[in-house]
Image (cartoon, rainbow, N blue to C red):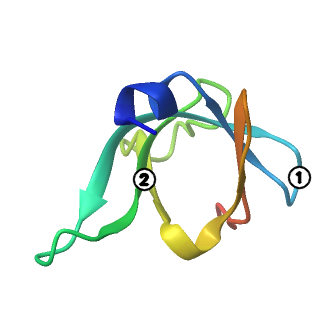
Amino acid sequence: MRLSDLQHKDVVNIIDGSKIGNIIDIKIDSKGNMEGLIVEKSKFIISMFTTKNEVEIKWGQIEKIGEDVILVNVSLV
């Protein structure tokens, strides 16, 4: 699977069923292993109290990569 394939999938939180956003980048360690996904937050998730409009999803937080969505288990507080 390519990064471009992942970028077309919605990232959905299984905790509350909300759409977090879409993948804009990946994080790779110094050995070339993928550590996680960088997700641009959906307009509904962005808070007026923060200017950070992206979130890092660690590889261990990914539950399932499906045909249309990526299910993750992450607490966004």
- Give the residue drawn at x 11%, y 76%: 30
| Closer to us: 53 or 1 | 1
Q: Give the CA separation, mark 1 to mark 2.
A: 19 Å
Q: Amino acid at mark 1?
A: Asp
- Give the residue drawn at x 37%, y 45%: 52
Instruction: Name the outermost residue toward the left.
Output: 30
- Give the residue drawn at x 42%, y 53%: 37
Relative placement, left or right, of 61 versus 68 is left
Residue 72, numbered circle: none
Quarter assignment of residue 36: bottom left
Which residue position is annotated with label 2?
37
SS for tag 2?
strand
Q: Position of residue 15 (x, y in %)?
A: 86, 60
Q: Amino acid at mark 2?
A: Leu
Instruction: Name the outermost residue toward the front.
Output: 1
SS for tag 1?
loop
Quarter in which the C terminus is drawn = bottom right
Q: Is residue 44 above or below residue 13?
A: above
> Can you tell which of label 1 and label 2 is closer to the viewer?
2
Q: Residues within 10 Å of mark 1 (few under 14, many from 20)?
A: few
Which residue position is annotated with label 1?
16
Q: Tag 2 or tag 1, which sits nearer the N-term? A: 1
Quarter assignment of residue 74: bottom right
Quarter assignment of residue 34: bottom left
